[in-house]
Image: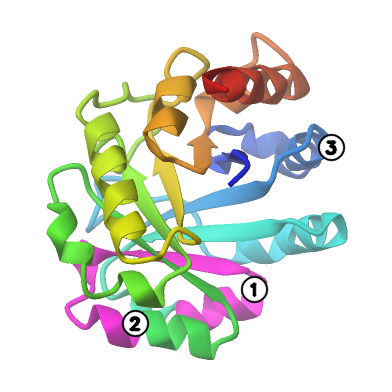
Amino acid sequence: MPVKIAPSILAADFTRLGEQVQQAIAAGADYIHVDVMDGHFVPNMTIGPLVVNALSPLTRSAGIILETHLMIERPERLLPEFAQAGADRITVHVETCPHLHRTVQQIKSLGLRAGVTLNPATPLVALEEILPSVDLVLVMSVNPGFGGQEYIPASTSRIARLRQMLRERGLEQVEIEVDGGIDAENAAEIVAAGATVLVAGTAVFHPAQSISENIAGLRAAANRRR
């Protein structure tokens, strides 16, 4: 699969959020990634359906996916709200869903693509039974809750093992998304391990360079494996 870049708005300037998302889209972003945190499952609080609703006209007019990563307890309560707000894909954590299959089916019943997420210390075996039902697996390469953290090196081998799991099950169409500490220095090794989507916040919205330069640099670095 071609490598996709998913800018995370967590690192954007929220006083210019619409403008910066438009710049990311114009620079060739494949997805726009929205991190939703509740202050319980992770030690931070962020945004909700209103922001997704505000961004959805921008992504829909550009024909790209608006993905919502729910780092919240009992995510099934809010799935209809995020669907109505305009999310195209919702990703939930294995750790927050005691009835994960039911939650994934609920996402799909709302007409959305479904993803599941693993924290760094959660074993890959937790995914085995749900893999045939999802469109994407999101591998957290930092402990969730805050942007700007350093990539956990052991994540690379986890990505490779997950890619092998998918290959052995004939599920290579399932995307592997990686989120946390991704930049131009480590993008190539992450993609070489099997990732197909790179979530990047600080590396895209860092003010030292333009958003277009940052996305171009990240994509070039990711493609160096070829």
Count of marks, rendered view:
3
Residue 26 placed where, x, y %? 84, 37
| Mark 2 Cα-neighbour bin, 10 Å: few <14, some 14–19, many ≥20 | many
Q: Nearer the viewer, residue 1 or 86?
A: 1
Frontmost of labels 3 and 1 is: 3
Q: Quadrant of residue 96?
A: bottom left
Residue 75 coordinates in the image, percent (x, y): 34, 74
Q: Secondary structure at mark 2?
A: helix
- The residue tagged 2 is 103
Q: Using the image, determine if residue 111 lies above or below residue 167.
A: below
Q: Which residues are magenta?
A: 79-103
The three-letter amino acid code for the residue at tag 3 is Ala
- The residue sitting at 45% across, 47% down in the picture is 177
Q: Secondary structure at mark 3?
A: helix
Q: Is residue 84 above or below residue 150?
A: below
Name the residue beneath numbered marker 3. Answer: 26
Left or right: 195 in relation to 49: left
Q: Amino acid at mark 1?
A: Ala
**Disc on res. 85:** 1
Distance in Å between CA atoms under marks 3 and 1? 22 Å
Assign a secondary structure to mark 1.
helix
